[in-house]
Amino acid sequence: MIEYRIATEKDIGLMMSSRLEMLREVNDLSEDYAYSEEFVAESRKYFLEGDQTTVLVLDGDRVIGCGTICYIVIMPTFSHPTGKRAHLMNVYTAKDYRRQGIGQKIVDLLIGDARKKGATEISLDATEAGRPLYRNCGFTDSEECMVLTCLMDER
């Protein structure tokens, strides 16, 4: 039986393993790819201390899906009077469970969480494969913002 649940700190091992599995697939990394100690430590720290909600989907003991929504607060604007915003990330379903509505349910649960927490905007970065899911959930492509990505070696 498939179980959807909000992860707690007791689930840190499951959260980490599902995130690393998702990153391997999305970034086309080999099974033996070694993540840096810093990356693993910072990911673990964020799951435990960051303002986030993670949904885990389990079939027995196996994690078959996951998704995380991260929260930030910025100065209020007219469009976002609370300043509360969210970023959806790491939505993933194991290959042999795809096309069963699992991703949609994960996203719906995280949108509900964002509504409860008063977020006025949810952003995300999507792969081409993920775009139909997000459009189905009500997301639209945005042309309203610009981004500067600061790379580690440019500090």
Image (spheres, grey):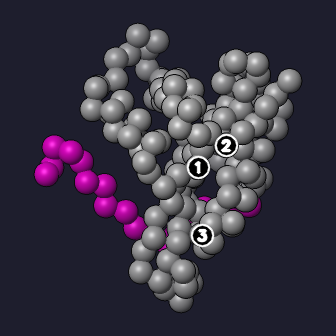
Q: Is residue 147 magenta?
A: yes
Mark 2 and mark 3 in contact (Cβ < 8 Å)? no
Residue 20: image location, x then y, percent: 48, 26
User: Image point 60% across, 69% down: which residue?
Assistant: 119
What residue is pinned by disc 3?
119
Find residue 6 and name its label: 2
Magenta stretch mostly in which secondary structure?
Answer: loop
Label whose residue precedes the other's in the sequence (2 or 1): 2
Point out residue 130 in the picture as x, y percentages from the top left corner. Answer: 64, 42
Q: Residue 45: which quarter of the image?
A: top left
Residue 94 shows up from this direction: no
Does label 3 or label 2 sit earlier along the sequence?
2
Q: Amino acid at mark 2?
A: Ile
- Of the pair 82 and 8, the residue shown nearer to us: 8
Instruction: Provide the residue span drawn in magenta.
Output: 138-155
Mark 1: amino acid: Thr
Observer-nearest of 38 and 91: 38
Q: For the residues marked 2 and 1, what is the alpha-carbon distance in whole angstroms?
A: 7 Å
Circles 2, 1 touching at the beta carbon (< 8 Å): yes
Q: Give the x, y percent position of residue 41.
A: 33, 33
Residue at x 42% of width, y 48% of height:
49
Please state which amino acid type lies under the numbered disc 3.
Ala
> Marks 1 and 3: in contact by CB < 8 Å?
no
Q: Secondary structure at mark 3?
A: loop
Helix, strand, or loop for circle 2? strand
Binning the other alpha carbons within 10 Å of mark 1 as few (below 14), some (14 to 19) or many (20 upward) gives many
Vertical relation: 104 (above or below) 97 = below
Quarter of the image for the N terminus: give it.
Answer: top right
Residue 53: which numbered mark, if any?
1
